[in-house]
Image (spheres, helix red, strand yellow):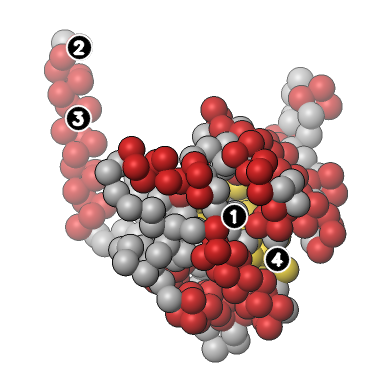
């Protein structure tokens, strides 16, 4: 009997699923209205790995700081450069019409690219400096240009400079993989400066991680970098603190200390008649 019920349940689920597809529904069977605003972390492997608990990832630390206040969304793509990321960002940003219909907003976005673009010219990931700057400008225009289908003047934007490259560590990695050195400190410097230049030209806030790590001295870079390029736990801690300071300085209204926690604390809830108290603010709009 139990087996029969299981089979019937499976057939019913499959029928509903097929019917949903045939009707051309834009929603899935299980859909959650999003009751939280968002922070978007967009970038390459340094962003992708920023949720790694073993590395005390800066994204995970940011999500912890904003827990029950804002959702921190990790959209990092290991190995990607600005050329490959351009069409991805276009898909991630909500179109203008959707912004009007959806209570939840993207409060802040970070663009953290350049570590791969700055690979040497023979490398697959290399993007010439002028094209790198043009790609960053195109990403900014997706958000800040009134002509853009994803124009979002309320979205706060932060550009993060790529970290300095520690050639000693990175050469060891290249040697271990049987390849030539494909990145240099000088190239990372130039691409970090390009991020600063674009940010200044466009009036965008910049979190200057390159300078922050260089302030510790070239001889100490290994203390903050896992392999000469990616952040270790110390590097992630510095990056998190830099981002929180940047938010406090430029966007203090969305600093986690200035945002209310969603829903009452459990000790403030009555035993009965609590339904109205546990309604998400955004879903009541």
Residue depicted at x 60% and y 47%:
72
Q: Earlier in the sequence, mark 4 or mark 3?
A: 3
Which residue in the structure is indicated by mark 4?
Answer: 206
Label 2, residues with CA under 10 Å away: few <14, some 14-19, many ≥20? few
Q: CA distance from mark 2 to mark 3?
A: 12 Å
The residue wearing badge 3 is 10
For the N terminus, give its image quadrant: top left
Camera-side residue of 31 and 40: 40
Residue placed most toward the observer, 168 or 199:
168
Local SS, label 1: loop
Q: SS at mark 3?
A: helix
User: Which residue is denoted by mark 1 in the rendering?
Assistant: 164
Question: What is the CA distance from the residue labelled 3 to the residue labelled 1?
Answer: 54 Å
Say which residue appears at 81% left-offset and 63% top-offset: 250
Q: Disc 1 to disc 4, how far (Cα)?
A: 16 Å
Residue 2 - label: 2
Q: Earlier in the sequence, mark 3 or mark 1?
A: 3
For the residues labelled 4 and 2, the Cα–Cα distance comes to: 61 Å
């Amino acid at each position: 009997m139990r087996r029969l019920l299981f089979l019937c349940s499976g057939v019913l689920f499959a029928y509903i699923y097929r019917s949903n597809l045939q009707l051309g529904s834009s929603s899935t069977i299980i859909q959650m209205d999003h009751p939280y605003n968002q922070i978007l972390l967009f970038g390459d492997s340094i962003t992708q790995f920023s949720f790694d608990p073993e590395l005390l990832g800066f994204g995970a630390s940011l999500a912890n700081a904003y827990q029950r206040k804002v959702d921190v969304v990790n959209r990092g793509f290991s190995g990607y450069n600005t050329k490959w990321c351009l069409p991805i960002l276009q898909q991630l940003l909500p179109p203008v019409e959707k912004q009007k219909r959806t209570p939840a907003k993207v409060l802040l976005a970070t663009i953290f690219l350049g570590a791969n673009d700055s690979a040497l010219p023979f490398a697959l990931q290399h993007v010439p400096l002028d094209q790198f700057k043009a790609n960053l400008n195109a990403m900014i225009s997706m958000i800040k240009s009134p002509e853009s289908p994803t124009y979002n003047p309320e979205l706060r934007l932060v550009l993060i400079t790529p970290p300095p490259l520690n050639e000693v560590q990175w050469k060891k990695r290249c040697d271990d993989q049987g390849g030539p050195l494909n990145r240099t400190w000088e190239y990372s410097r130039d691409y970090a400066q390009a991020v600063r230049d674009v940010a200044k030209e466009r009036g965008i806030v910049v979190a200057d991680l390159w300078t922050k790590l260089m302030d510790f001295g070239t001889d100490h870079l290994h203390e903050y970098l896992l392999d000469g390029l990616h952040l270790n736990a110390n590097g992630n801690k510095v990056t998190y603190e830099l981002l929180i300071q940047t938010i406090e300085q430029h966007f203090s209204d969305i600093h986690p200390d200035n945002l209310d926690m969603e829903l009452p604390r459990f000790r403030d809830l009555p035993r009965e008649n609590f339904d109205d108290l546990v309604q998400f603010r955004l879903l009541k709009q």
